[in-house]
Image (tube, helix red, strand yellow):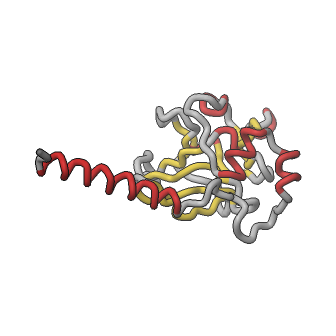
Amino acid sequence: MIKTSDFTRRGLLAAGVAGLALSLAGRKSPAVASEGAFEFILSEAEWRERLTPKQFRILREEDTERPFTSALNNEKRKGMYHCAGCDLPVYSSETKYDSGTGWPSFWEAEADAVSTKPDPTLFGVYTEVHCRRCGGHFGHIFDDGPPPTGKRHCINGFALSFKPASAQNT
């Protein structure tokens, strides 16, 4: 004999699996960061030659590095963080802070350095942040950061390069 509660659980499970499949089917795989009109454009082959495999997956295919794997997470010197793809200065060390998440975090980007777009996921719509010049994927922006902006730019360290401030400029 089948109980109504057993049937309901099976139905809910089936509906959940179907919903997951539909949501995944609607998402591009892999995502492509280079969609759009950008100032700095390279072919896929040129990007692969310019970037390491990990940088390519993050910047061009919108992958995410594992937390605590980038040396830039622990970078404490004064300087500027640049896009690893096109070398655009995007974040100042003055806006970097330790969010405890395992990724370099900043409360603000440089003026006219980044662009954003909606990033739908299974858990809601996030705000994806990318280089405004080459379209390279950096990470996401969340509303749980410190003052003065209240924003947390949660950035893949492998999407950036760091240039320390020279002794003459300090």
Q: Write the residue at 71% across / 39% down.
A: 79
Question: How far from the left and from the top, in percent, is residue 74?
Answer: 61, 28
Position of 62 relative to 53 (above/below) = below
Question: How far from the left and from the top, in percent, is residue 76?
Answer: 63, 30
Q: Write the residue at 62% across / 42% down.
A: 156
| Extreme residue in the bottom direction | 37
**How many marks can you see?**
0
Q: Nearer the viewer, residue 138 or 29?
A: 29
Q: Write the residue at 64% across / 54% down.
A: 30
Question: How far from the left and from the top, in percent, is residue 152?
Answer: 49, 48
The quadrant of the picture occupied by the C terminus is: top right
Left or right placement of residue 49 versus residue 7 in this view: right
The quadrant of the picture occupied by the N terminus is: top left
Question: How far from the left and from the top, in percent, is residue 7?
Answer: 19, 51
Q: Write the residue at 67% across / 63% down.
A: 112
| Quarter-of-image position of residue 11 | bottom left
Left or right placement of residue 9 versus residue 86 in this view: left
Q: Nearer the viewer, residue 110 or 34?
A: 34
Left or right placement of residue 44 versus residue 127 in this view: right
Position of 29 relative to 101 (above/below) = below
| Extreme residue in the front direction | 1
Q: Nearer the viewer, residue 6 or 165?
A: 6
Q: Nearer the viewer, residue 30 or 12?
A: 12
